[in-house]
Amino acid sequence: MAIGWTVVLLAISPLLGVPWGRAGDFDFRTTMYYHAIMLPLVGILILIASLIMKVGGHVDTLLRYSLVPAIVLCGVGSLFIKDVSDWFPLWMQIIGFLVLDEMAIALLFGLIRMPRRTGQGFRKMNIGYWLVLTTVAAAFIAAVFGHGAGVGIDWGFSSVPGLPGYITSQGIDQSTFTDNLMGSHSHDMLPSVMGGIVGLAMVFFGYDTLKGPRRWLATLGMAVSEFGVLSMTLVFIVAGLTSWGPPTLFQNDPNGLASDDVLMGLVGMGAVIALVGIISMPVERRGKKTVPLAKDPLRLSVVISWLLAFVSVAVFGYFIEFSETYFSSDAGLPHDEAFTSTHLMFGFFMLPIVAGCLLAVDLIYRRTENAPYPQFVAPLALVGEAVMFLGGLVWIMALNSVLFFVGFGVLVFTLLLIAYYLYGIRSMPMSRPSQG
């Protein structure tokens, strides 16, 4: 249902006048439309996390029953918010937020009690467990900050006892405080979601069965991502609640690297290191037949998204930050705005959606008896990812977005195939082992 919803909204977005092709940051309407698509994805990822981590029990039941209300309320509510005065869809969205919060809290509860339930204890839990736990916690903190920013945008903070005085004590006004909360929300949420997908994939793929250097690289990669998640979340908590801002490194005005961008980049860098560790691990295709992960298109399409996200967001972004002399000039500003669009649309929008949905397909395929291999889904996903990545580079350099949106269209069609595939195997028994 959620994937079908995503396909429909992406397909009809041009008809509704959503300006994906406009260079620069999203406007309010586009941001709400973005949330109409991304919030249902968060619900899917929470349920996937419960299945992969084998949370089970009442938590799993609660999450299953909460997913549809979260999709309907968040998705439909966000879709029809065009202005803060649209009170009915706004309250639909707010109630949907509360359902997603309930799902996140339930998942956190299930994950925190896992060590005791399994008899292992926290000290024996591996890095995959810790990465999943901390990314879920970080995403929940980011969501709370987003709620706070929403209060500031919709009603202001004057009615919150003690808060106006605190804001004044920080030497800022309410508008700046709202902006700080919103900045911390968006900057912490998106890397946390992608880091969570990485952690879930590594656990599901069975990285802990590796031996030698491959196991060491996989563990190192997740440890780097874990450090990135923890450090960036701490920085964004402080930056969101105070007047302090992360310092700029290697500053040579106007050039310099924002330190919070470095910490966010560590999440992606860790994913790339982990990718190297698992790229040759064996993957079961049918019965006893196995192939290296690099030759299994489905899993390859998942891990390649990590590499492309890191390059398109962090590597390109670092280059621009060290070249602000040009990119902040009249000649370079259009290229800077093109980067803003490409990293939002590709690295922080389509890649998490596609990676999350591909992981869902992998999970259902491996666990469903007699399910056919999704042979058209994965190659098309790889083509779409590559074309959209190259199209983003062309857009930044030549200010031509045609190839970028060709890739966008391919990925939307891939999501349609995913929805069709999952619908086709919905009645098949799920009795296969969870590890691939």
Image (spheres, helix red, strand yellow):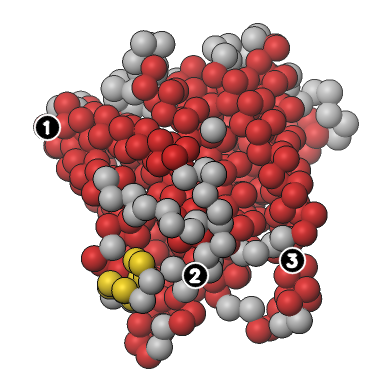
Give the residue pinned by disc 2: 435
Residue shown at the point (35%, 87%) measured from the top left? 213
Residue shown at the point (69%, 44%) measured from the top left? 64
Quadrant of the drawing holding the C terminus:
bottom left
Amino acid, disc 1: Ala
Give the residue pinned by disc 1: 398
Badge 1 density bin: few <14, some 14–19, many ≥20, Cα 10 Å: few
Give the quarter of the image for residue 272. bottom left
- Residue 205 shown left or right of residue 317 in the figure: right
* SS at badge 2: loop
Give the residue pinned by disc 3: 112
Q: Is residue 314 at least partly visible in the picture?
A: no
Residue shown at the point (50%, 56%) measured from the top left? 368
- Residue 425 shown left or right of residue 272 in the figure: right
Instruction: Give the x, y percent position of residue 360.
Output: 48, 50
Quadrant of the drawing holding the N terminus:
top right
First in sequence: mark 2 vs mark 1: 1
- Residue 18 shown left or right of residue 56 in the figure: left
Instruction: Give the x, y percent position of residue 349.
Output: 41, 38
Instruction: Give the x, y percent position of residue 67.
Output: 66, 38
The foreground one among 270 and 204 is: 204
First in sequence: mark 3 vs mark 1: 3
First in sequence: mark 2 vs mark 3: 3
Amino acid, disc 3: Ile
* Marking on residue 10: none
**Mark 3 or mark 1, whichever is nearer to me:** 3
Query: In 3D space, how far apart are the residues under numbered discs 2 and 1 (Cα atoms)?
Result: 44 Å
Query: In 3D space, how far apart are the residues under numbered discs 3 and 1 (Cα atoms)?
Result: 49 Å
**Mark 2 or mark 1, whichever is nearer to me:** 2
Q: Is residue 410 above or below residue 250?
A: above
